[in-house]
Image (spheres, grey):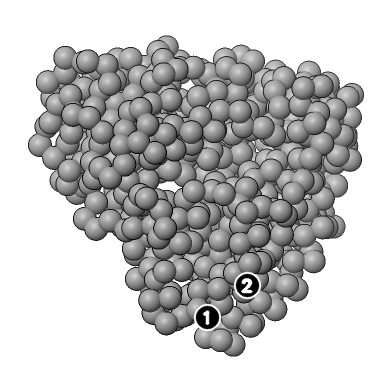
């Protein structure tokens, strides 16, 4: 019996608009062709990329060989007294394991940050009981490599052989795979190279860290397998057809934003964090060439933004439909992973874009490298932002980048909001510690209450691996509020000429530089005292 996964198009108008598209994709046999690995579906320009990116459609079968390997390694680690799993990963390498373990209620420490405070907190755990999963598709992710270096040095300082605690997940032939073999790391898992990072939830990238932490990965694959036939069927009832065509029809009508919320948070088996995973999948897959879908993750169906201030968004409930939702998607976690992947691929075809590339992601990485190398716009060795702030207001330094005449933080924020174009959005980007500085996430609903526009929130640098693509390649109607902060205690990165704090700041400045060069308004506030600065920022927003 198949695993139930259901999509309900609640809005009658949207359902009517979606029906012709559903008829089109059924007639073109899009779902069955995706399931069969047909790389021609997205046009000639996308064919070469699509040909090596459709392995996700059969992972419910091909990933089963991992189940025994993961279980055996977990038993082996436990026999050695190792029962604490830390994951060093970014984007597709961290979001799926996090939602899997959160949903199952098992402990996994996820390091998808360059914030020295958050890394130090992970280091403060019992290293004698710790294994580090180093997860990078390219094998060269700077954040992941930095975390690996820091942990290896700390373990060695504690008399622990680092190689005995290192577990690597990467594609074949990467520098990380070569390093793991040269250094004799405890285990090397080679992932399916025919699956892109954001589609990799059911590959080794999702299953290894989650399974080592104690999640039932066999059940997850069973859930996906139970939905696979329905999602690859050329039928008007196919849930992926309904979801993908609803999103495409809404986009055609001017609703390029997708407001996502989990409607059963707190319920047993609630898919905690799935909205963040969907955010990455949709934004990076569709946000390019001036088009695409911008996910706006909100805290609950009652949060500001779910009942939209305009007609530029489609409210989607993950879980049972609630008032205000235009679409709902229900099903187990494994089934939802596959549902959203199919729907995203279908939406990409209908929007006329390649859902498997990310042409604008490298720009911020290049700007970061230039800053760390002492290139234009920055220099190595600085503890604070490059250049002088345009104004200082208490514990907040304000960098407008535009020669603004604002004399206070309040005025700078008002100027930024006034710059949001019609049907635009405000993106809040917090390059902080997402545990100790968690209160920063409250800025999203507070701004949404007052701004009258859609407001997104992302922790830096992890959003660079997801919505960062949309910011630069999607609809060009965003403005950006960056938040950086001083650190109490920095951490050196062994054998590198910069520290974690310097890397974190260069990532913020590099992305801000790219956005500004592309004509976007960017306001950066730097907190010289994080707690006081955040309180001051909240107070300023409340006065808007």
Closest to the camera, between mark 2 and mark 1, is 2
Q: Residues within 10 Å of mark 2 (few under 14, many from 20)?
A: some
Q: Pinpoint residue 119: horizontal percent, then vertical percent.
A: 37, 60
For mark 2, what is the residue?
184
The residue at the point 71 percent across, 27 percent down is: 354
Q: Quadrant of residue 431?
A: top left
Please name whichever residue, 533 or 519, is drawn nearer the observer in this view of the structure: 519
Farthest residue, direction left = 394
Q: Is residue 182 above or below residue 97?
A: below
The residue at the point 16 percent across, 14 percent down is: 405
Q: Pinpoint residue 247: horizontal percent, then vertical percent.
A: 65, 27
How far apart, in angstroms, are the residues tagged by discs 2 and 1? 18 Å
Asked which secondary structure carries label 1, the reply is loop
Q: Relative to residue 248, is residue 47 drawn left or right?
A: right
The residue at the point 17 percent across, 47 percent down is: 529
Q: Relative to residue 297, is residue 376 drawn left or right?
A: left
Quarter of the picture containing the C terminus is top left
Q: Relative to residue 505, is residue 83 drawn left or right?
A: right
Asked whether residue 535 is in view, the answer is no
Q: Is residue 296 above or below residue 78?
A: above
Please name whichever residue, 390 or 230, is drawn nearer the observer in this view of the structure: 390
Q: Pinpoint residue 286: horizontal percent, then vertical percent.
A: 63, 28
Q: Pinpoint residue 466: horizontal percent, then vertical percent.
A: 53, 38
Earlier residue among tags 2 and 1: 1
Please name whichever residue, 43 or 316, is drawn nearer the observer in this view of the structure: 43
For mark 1, what is the residue?
82
Asked which secondary structure carries label 2, the reply is loop
């Amino acid at each position: 019996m198949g695993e139930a996964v259901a999509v309900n198009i609640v809005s009658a108008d949207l359902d009517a608009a979606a029906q012709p598209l559903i008829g089109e994709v059924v007639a073109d046999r899009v779902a069955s062709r995706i399931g069969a690995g047909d790389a021609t579906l997205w046009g000639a320009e996308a064919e070469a990329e699509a040909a090596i990116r459709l392995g996700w459609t059969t992972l419910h079968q091909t990933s089963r060989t991992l189940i025994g390997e993961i279980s055996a390694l977990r038993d082996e680690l436990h026999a050695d007294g190792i029962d604490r799993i830390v994951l060093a990963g970014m984007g597709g390498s961290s979001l799926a394991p996090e939602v899997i373990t959160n949903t199952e209620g098992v402990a996994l420490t996820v390091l998808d940050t360059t914030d020295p405070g958050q890394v130090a907190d992970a280091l403060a755990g019992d290293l004698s009981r710790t294994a580090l999963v180093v997860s990078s598709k390219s094998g060269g992710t700077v954040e992941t490599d930095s975390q690996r270096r820091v942990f290896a040095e700390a373990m060695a300082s504690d008399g622990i052989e680092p190689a005995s605690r290192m577990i690597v997940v990467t594609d074949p032939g990467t520098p990380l795979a070569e390093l793991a073999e040269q250094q004799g790391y405890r285990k090397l898992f080679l992932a399916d190279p025919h699956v892109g990072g954001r589609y990799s939830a059911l590959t080794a990238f999702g299953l290894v860290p989650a399974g080592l932490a104690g999640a039932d990965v066999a059940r997850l694959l069973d859930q996906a397998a139970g939905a696979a036939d329905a999602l690859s069927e050329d039928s008007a009832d196919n849930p992926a057809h309904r979801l993908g065509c609803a999103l495409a029809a809404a986009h055609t009508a001017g609703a390029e934003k997708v407001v996502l919320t989990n409607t059963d948070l707190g319920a047993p088996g609630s898919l905690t964090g799935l909205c963040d995973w969907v955010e990455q999948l949709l934004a990076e897959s569709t946000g390019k060439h001036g088009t695409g879908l911008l996910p706006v993750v909100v805290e609950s169906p009652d949060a500001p933004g779910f009942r939209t201030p305009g007609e530029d968004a489609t409210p989607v409930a993950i879980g049972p439909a609630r008032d205000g939702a235009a679409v709902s998607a229900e099903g187990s976690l494994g089934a939802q992973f596959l549902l959203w992947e199919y729907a995203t691929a279908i939406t990409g075809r209908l929007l006329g874009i390649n859902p498997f590339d990310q042409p604008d992601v490298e720009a911020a990485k290049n700007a970061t490298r230039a800053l760390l190398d002492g290139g234009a716009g920055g220099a190595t060795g600085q503890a604070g932002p490059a250049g002088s702030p345009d104004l200082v207001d208490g514990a907040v330094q304000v960098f407008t980048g535009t020669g603004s005449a604002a004399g206070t933080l309040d005025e700078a924020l008002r100027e930024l909001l006034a710059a949001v174009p019609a049907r635009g959005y405000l993106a809040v980007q917090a390059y902080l510690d997402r545990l100790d500085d968690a209160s920063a996430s409250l800025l999203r609903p507070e701004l949404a209450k007052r701004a009258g526009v859609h407001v997104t929130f992302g922790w830096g640098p992890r959003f660079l691996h997801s919505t960062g693509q949309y910011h630069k390649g999607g609809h060009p109607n965003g403005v950006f509020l960056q938040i950086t902060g001083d650190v109490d205690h920095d951490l050196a990165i062994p054998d590198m000429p910069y520290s974690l704090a310097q890397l974190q700041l260069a990532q913020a400045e590099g992305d801000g530089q790219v956005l500004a060069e592309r004509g976007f308004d960017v306001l950066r506030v730097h907190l010289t005292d994080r707690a006081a600065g955040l309180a001051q920022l909240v107070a300023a927003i409340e006065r808007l």
